[in-house]
Image (cartoon, rainbow, N blue to C red):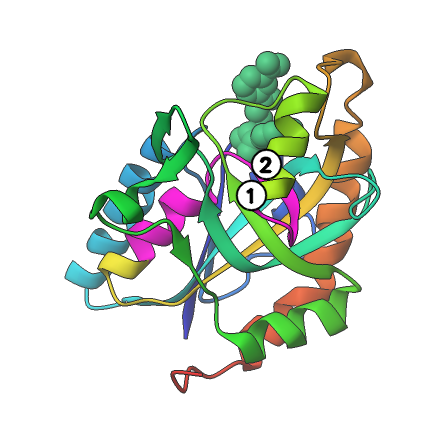
Amino acid sequence: MRILVATAVPVERDAVARAFPGPVPGVDVLAVGVGPALAAASTATALTRAALAGAPYGLVVSAGIGGGFLPHAPVGSLVVADEITAADLGAETADGFVPVTELGFGAVTHRPPEVLVRAAAAATGARAGAVLTVSTVTGTAARASALRERHPTALVEAMEGFGVAEAAGAHGVPVLEIRAVSNPVGPRDRAAWRIGDALAALTEGFGKLTPVLESWEHHDD
Ligand SMILES: O=C(O)c1cccc(C(=O)CC[C@H]2O[C@@H](n3cnc4c(=O)[nH]cnc43)[C@H](O)[C@@H]2O)c1
């Protein structure tokens, strides 16, 4: 089975690639850009190109760093998504946020295969929980609390997972998301982001995850 690993930026791509001693046949790691729209477009393009070449991918993995909801996902920890949810795709109303699904449109959540989530968490020591996709990095305690109130199982927010998952879904390919926590979700303190520690955790996690991905077979679970 061919696997596409989609990171946002080249440093994340390189952190994933460092987990492998050399090129791994069947595993491609691609930097697809920051944010859900560019990530969706780039991932869909890669999936289409592979399908047209007669070598389709059987699994897409969205991977990278992310903000962790404290105390559930501390800096340096790993999280695997049991749900990939677009947290700001909807409408603001006088009564609060309404997701697009309640307005009669589209989807806001993709669920990776349960068996794969469990195996990935067991192999890497990652916590399993919801990973939110946002277009705006949270910068206040109030927004962090509002997100957790709306999504009580959320462990991480990042900016690409839902876009990658939409592209995978359009191709009928299962998706997984794994994030290494670089910063707490909350008041903006960009200087405190531990990007190096998170990238190291991503490399270590991917070393343990790759055999799981390679041996996994999709049975619509
Ligand atoms: O400094 C900023 O305000 C800023 C605004 C937009 C993007 C960035 C990035 O550095 C994005 C990098 C990448 O990291 C993921 N990420 C990491 N932490 C968070 C977070 O707390 N909330 C959302 N995304 C996060 C994200 O997936 C980006 O691709 C900085």
Q: CA distance from mark 1 to mark 2?
A: 5 Å
The answer, for residue 29, to whether it is visible in the render is: no
Residue 59 position within the rendered picture, expressed as x and y whole percent measured from the top left? 42, 66
Q: What is the residue that sits farthest to the left in this orientation?
A: 52
Which residue is most to the front? 95
**Residue where numbered disc 2 is placed:** 147
Instruction: Determine which of the numbered discs, if any, sits on residue 150 in the image.
Output: 1
- Asked which secondary structure carries label 2, the reply is helix
Question: Label 1 is placed on what type of residue?
Answer: Arg
Residue 207, how many percent across, how many down? 72, 61
* Residue 161 part of the magenta segment: yes
In the image, what residue type sits under mark 2?
Answer: Leu
Q: How many C-alpha atoms fall within 10 Å of the one at disc 2: few (<14), some, or many (≥20)?
A: some
- In this orientation, which residue lies closer to the viewer: 139 or 146? 146
Judge: label 2 CB < 8 Å from ligand 1.
Answer: no
Residue 204, x across and y down, in percent? 77, 54
Q: How many marks?
A: 2
Does 82 appear above or below 44? below
The residue at the point 27 percent across, 55 percent down is 47
- Image region (quadrant) for ligand 1: top right
Q: Which mark is residue 58?
A: none
